[in-house]
Image (spheres, grey):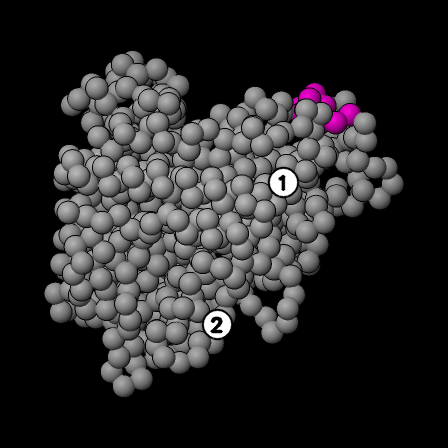
């Protein structure tokens, strides 16, 4: 079992909101429930600060559930000579793999196909060798690439043996190296649960309407509980704004020109079945704009990404047909059997929060560094960065907030804090055959659960022991058990059908029907936990069906403008009884 891990169920959420609004002054309130905000809440709580975190939608509902699912240093940043960022990210990769989230972050081998003689092999080889070298430096002497194997040069024959789907014609060999993948949405929820275990008050579907002011100083936030329609005031000595691509809008609430500006860059990803590409490794290729990844994802591949400016509705980044065609064209350039639109199970679009400069440079050239600043007294803003370095961003934000607190604040210790599920994971993994025998589930199911819940698998299995019907897989989404749906609402803060189908599970992108056929059973399982009436169940199903229809329509549109218009057909919040 994990150590300091709290439930985020309906009762706990209401208790947190009540405590936030009881008039006392907290040390820190964090606005934004993405990976950086969740990391900041954990950092503050583990320094002994009275902490709260609020999120307008669901945990990780923005950028933090729509990434490339990679924990990596970023090979392409070496070309930009951004060695500091790469080394920092590789250090964080090592921490996540070994200590912080070994159940959610796992090593992945990648092939970089070489398609020419001459300069390409020494150039790519030198870059990957530097990548491995920076990884070792970031962790100190004796660590082999943060626990990952070092890169290898492969001949054409060796490359084709690993990845038979690669086109033979122009292939001259490959470089194999290692990075890591992550379930980004689960990482974020795990951060929130861990923070709550250390005393943080956490509430999703709680939108900040504005800041409380005394003179020029920010002294808290005004919050609306979107589930009940009630408003409350949350007072705090320091407010941390960690709202990602919404940074400019949140800063504007203080009524002054913000010092930090963020530009949204859209990245889209395709999900295709594993059998469409025959390869034992992931793939990485250069494109004229960025890099293209083909990433193993359970019984699927994730193909991404694009990198284009997005100036439309930030709540609904939309993939257009042009985006999908772009990715298919680029990946098909190296595959013997091309992928078509009919092979695409799912599509998702996310927005990167890039620090905006004074020029009109392309988003692919904007910095992935982060910045922290005091916009006005009492308000800390953190922006930029990348998923892999969330912990450093969170630490820097709370360091800044600590300067505004009268008492001395201890230094960050999150480099030593395993997240919910990390404790006991390896021991439970080694015991997976015994757990399978005791639970009556196949060992493959136990492995699936361990990779999602780690040492907290016992909490899920307790639900199965109490009700054997929860051991059944979901209709049309065989990878997931009914127990996982109940657990998502009772322990992981899911409030709506979309939260479960899109973020607690990934059924919305892993099935050709985008989860529509699974939705009735999922709603049926959620209803008693969340207290839904029959009318509410129908509203949830209708809302989800409209969302899927709007996304499908946007993906048939030729460009961003028309795709955005289509995507706006999906309602934002499900009304409650």
Q: Which mark is residue 184?
A: none
Q: Nearer the viewer, mark 2 or mark 1?
A: 1
Dominant SS of magenta comes to loop
Across the whole image, how many numbered discs are drawn on residues? 2
Q: Nearer the viewer, residue 498 or 287?
A: 498
Judge whether 256 appears above or below 266 on screen. Answer: below
Q: Is residue 563 left or right of residue 361?
A: left
The question of residue 239 being in magenta is answered with no
Q: Which residue is mark 2?
A: 260
Judge whether 444 appears above or below 559 on screen. Answer: above
What separation in Å lies between label 2 and label 1 (alpha carbons)? 34 Å
Locate residue 219: give its quadrant: bottom left
Q: Which residue is mark 1?
A: 325
> What is the secondary structure assignment of the residue under circle 2?
loop
> Which segment did they paint magenta?
159-168
Q: Which residue: 54% across, 41% down?
A: 556
Q: Position of residue 561 (x, y in %)?
A: 54, 55
């Amino acid at each position: 079992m994990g150590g300091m891990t709290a439930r985020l169920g309906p009762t706990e959420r209401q208790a947190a909101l009540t405590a936030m609004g009881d008039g006392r002054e907290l040390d820190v309130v964090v606005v934004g429930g993405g990976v950086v905000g969740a990391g900041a809440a954990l950092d503050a709580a583990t320094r002994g600060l009275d902490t709260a975190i609020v999120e307008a939608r669901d945990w990780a509902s923005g950028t933090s559930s729509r990434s490339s699912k990679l924990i990596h240093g970023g090979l392409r940043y070496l070309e930009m000579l951004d060695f500091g960022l790469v080394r920092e990210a590789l250090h964080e990769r090592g921490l996540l793999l070994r200590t912080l989230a070994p159940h959610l972050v796992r090593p992945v081998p990648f092939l970089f196909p070489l398609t020419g003689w001459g300069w390409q092999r020494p150039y790519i080889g030198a870059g990957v060798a530097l990548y491995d070298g920076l990884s070792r430096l970031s962790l100190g002497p004796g660590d082999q690439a943060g626990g990952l194997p070092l890169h290898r040069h492969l001949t054409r024959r060796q490359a084709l043996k690993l990845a038979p789907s690669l086109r033979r014609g122009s292939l001259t060999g490959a470089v194999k190296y290692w990075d890591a993948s992550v379930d980004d949405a689960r990482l974020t929820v795990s951060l929130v649960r861990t923070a709550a275990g250390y005393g943080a008050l956490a509430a999703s579907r709680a939108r900040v309407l504005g800041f409380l002011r005394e003179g020029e100083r920010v002294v808290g936030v005004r919050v609306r509980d979107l589930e009940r329609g009630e408003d409350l005031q949350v007072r705090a000595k320091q407010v941390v704004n960690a709202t990602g691509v919404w940074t400019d809008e949140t800063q504007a609430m203080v009524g002054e020109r913000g010092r930090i500006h963020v530009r949204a860059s859209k990245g889209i990803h395709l999900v295709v079945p594993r059998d469409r590409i025959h390869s034992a490794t992931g793939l990485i290729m250069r494109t004229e704009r960025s890099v293209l990844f083909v990433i193993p994802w359970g019984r699927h591949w994730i193909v991404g990404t694009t990198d284009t400016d997005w100036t439309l509705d930030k709540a609904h980044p939309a993939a257009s047909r042009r985006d999908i065609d772009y990715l298919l064209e680029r990946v098909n350039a190296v595959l013997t059997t091309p992928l078509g639109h009919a092979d695409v199970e799912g599509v998702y679009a996310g927005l990167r929060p890039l620090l905006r400069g004074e020029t009109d440079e392309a988003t692919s050239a904007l910095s992935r560094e982060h910045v922290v600043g005091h916009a006005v007294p009492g308000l800390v803003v953190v922006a930029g960065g990348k998923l892999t370095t969330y912990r450093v961003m969170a630490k820097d934000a709370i360091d800044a907030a600590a300067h505004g607190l009268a008492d001395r604040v201890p230094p960050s210790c999150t480099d030593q804090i395993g997240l919910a599920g990390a404790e006991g994971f390896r021991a439970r993994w080694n015991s997976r055959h015994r757990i399978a025998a005791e639970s009556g589930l196949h060992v493959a199911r136990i492995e699936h659960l361990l990779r999602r819940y780690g040492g907290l698998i016992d909490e899920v299995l307790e639900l199965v022991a109490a009700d054997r019907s929860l051991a059944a897989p979901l209709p049309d989404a065989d990878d997931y058990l009914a127990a996982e749906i109940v657990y998502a609402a009772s322990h992981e803060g899911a409030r709506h059908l979309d939260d479960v189908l899109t973020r607690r599970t990934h059924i919305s992108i892993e099935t050709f029907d985008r989860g529509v056929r699974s939705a009735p059973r999922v709603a049926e399982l959620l209803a008693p936990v969340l207290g839904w009436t029959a009318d509410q169940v129908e509203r949830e199903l209708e809302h989800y069906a409209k969302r899927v229809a709007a996304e499908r329509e946007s993906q048939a549109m030729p460009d961003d403008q028309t795709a955005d218009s289509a995507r706006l057909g999906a309602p934002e919040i499900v009304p409650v009884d």
